Image (cartoon, rainbow, N blue to C red):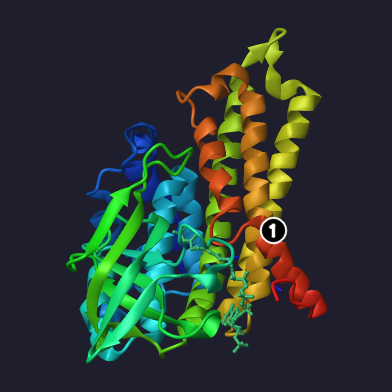
């Protein structure tokens, strides 16, 4: 086993580090306060290839494996988890699903725009009444000749108001997972409305929205994958999504640790830097161990994915551990900063607010535990 990354991976990681330092870190506090990043960041992410990772160059992608994707997300999230989330959703949940299951025409139509950052995608699974129990979703798509007419509501949709294409999961058949089909819905379709949800605790730089689909008409050519195959497609997307959330949590935890070490060496109390106090060192040591453990679980998952082996359970493990660890690490960071950590002059409060949602979205920590438990025992708690 060799845990060193290749020269190519190192160069990509360095590029992501420089990009984050230049284009993200100086603005993250303002974006957090304004509840929006500067939108020109998105095409800039496309120009450096971060929105096309893992996608074939023939469709405007920049290639690379899952480890490359995780390395970039770690660096970006170290600067701003909200930006990491924009990439995870547009590329990870939408672009990669399209690249895997789309027809040639669908790939030609959407992937170049998504990879270049001139367009964005959003993932419409969650509904007001169905979060964890995604297979019970109520949005309906009804056949009308060669078209489908979609009606329903989606909530907490990352990129919702900025997206050009929404990957919408809708019921085309009976109850349960087998009645669900996926559609690529252009967001300028008549009857499609996106309303921004403001006042979030964290991830404030990204646009989170409620979507309303009122008799939105799409062609059968906009169906992604088989009729009735939408749920499996969503679950496979979420396996990759959970890995990307884990990678983002590693970055946020690392960022919180780095600023805490720096601050502890500068801040003096009782006539010496607080880094000299053993209880502060304990806080820092716990943060470092948890960050490293989260990274190893994430890389293990990426390695399995890159070998073409199943990685769903490992993605749940990585996401469960990394998200919970990132919250603890960010909380410790506030402890190191004391009162200064409670105001947004320093970034540690933002790390805590941003990471808090990662134990909720793309499957709560409890859902991840039940998935891991199901893999261990063969017993399905959801049945
Ligand atoms: N890959 C491929 N197929 C899968 C799969 C996977 N990872 N997981 C399940 N399936 C298949 C199953 O094999 C099964 O098919 P068969 O009957 O043919 O075998 C079918 O899908 C149904 O699976 P389950 O029986 O597991 O379905 P369930 O209703 O019991 O679902 C669940 C269980 C795991 C709780 C699922 O509903 C779930 O993951 N819930 C959490 C939802 C979630 O993560 N939402 C996140 C929203 S997106 C988001 O947050 C994005 C954002 O904007 C940030």
In this orientation, does residue 65 appear? yes
- In percent of width and height, residue 41 lies at 27, 50
> Measuring 48% from the left and 37% from the top, which residue is drawn there?
201
Horizontally, is 222 left or right of 205 in the view? Answer: left
Viewer-side residue, 8 vs 339: 339
Q: Residue 189, located in which quarter of the rendered image?
A: bottom left
The total of numbered circles placed on residues is: 1
Viewer-side residue, 86 vs 370: 370
Tell me the crowding category of disc 1: few under 14, some 14 to 19, or many 20 or more residues within 10 angstroms, Cα based.
few
Horizontally, is 43 left or right of 78 in the view? Answer: left
Identify the residue under disc 1.
366
- In percent of width and height, residue 165 lies at 27, 68
Q: Which quarter of the rendered image does ligand 1 occupy?
A: bottom right
> Measuring 31% from the left and 89% from the top, which residue is drawn there?
103
Helix, strand or loop under label 1: helix
> Measuring 58% from the left and 67% from the top, which residue is drawn there?
133
> Measuring 35% from the left and 71% from the top, which residue is drawn there?
167
In this orientation, does residue 296 appear? no
Vertical order, 53 against 308 (above or below)? above
Vertical order, 27 against 242 (above or below)? above
Viewer-side residue, 62 vs 154: 154
């Amino acid at each position: 086993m060799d845990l060193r990354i290749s020269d190519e991976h190192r160069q990509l990681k360095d590029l992501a580090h420089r990009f984050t330092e230049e284009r993200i870190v100086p603005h993250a506090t303002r974006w957090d306060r304004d509840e929006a990043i500067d939108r020109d960041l998105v095409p800039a992410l496309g120009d450096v290839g971060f929105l096309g990772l893992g996608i074939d160059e023939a469709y405007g992608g920049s290639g690379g494996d899952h480890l490359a994707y995780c390395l970039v997300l770690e660096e970006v999230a170290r600067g701003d988890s909200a930006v990491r989330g924009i990439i995870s959703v547009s590329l990870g949940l939408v672009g990669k699903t399209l690249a895997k299951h789309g027809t040639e025409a669908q790939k030609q139509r959407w992937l170049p725009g998504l990879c270049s950052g001139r367009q964005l995608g959003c993932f419409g699974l969650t509904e007001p009444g169905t979060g964890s129990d995604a297979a019970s979703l109520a949005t309906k798509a009804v056949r009308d000749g060669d078209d489908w007419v979609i009606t329903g509501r989606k909530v907490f949709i990352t990129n919702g108001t900025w997206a050009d294409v929404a990957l919408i999961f809708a019921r085309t058949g009976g109850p349960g997972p087998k009645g669900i089909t996926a559609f690529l819905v252009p967001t300028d379709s008549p009857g499609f409305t996106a309303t921004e949800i403001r006042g979030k605790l964290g991830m404030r730089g990204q646009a989170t929205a409620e979507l309303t689909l009122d008799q939105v008409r799409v062609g059968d050519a906009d169906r992604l994958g088989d009729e009735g195959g939408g749920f499996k497609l969503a679950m496979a997307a979420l396996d990759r999504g959970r890995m990307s959330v884990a990678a983002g949590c590693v970055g946020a935890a690392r960022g919180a640790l780095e600023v805490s070490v720096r601050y502890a060496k500068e801040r003096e109390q009782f006539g010496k830097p607080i880094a000299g106090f053993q209880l502060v060192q304990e806080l820092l040591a716990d943060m470092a161990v948890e960050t490293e453990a989260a990274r190893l679980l994430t890389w293990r998952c990426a390695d399995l994915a890159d070998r073409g082996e199943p990685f769903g359970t490992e993605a749940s493990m990585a996401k469960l551990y990394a998200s919970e660890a990132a919250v603890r690490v960010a909380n410790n960071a506030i402890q190191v900063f004391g009162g200064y950590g409670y105001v947004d002059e320093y970034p540690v409060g933002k790390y805590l607010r941003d990471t808090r949602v990662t134990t909720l979205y793309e499957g709560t920590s409890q859902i991840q535990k039940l998935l891991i438990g199901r893999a261990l025992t063969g017993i399905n708690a959801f049945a």
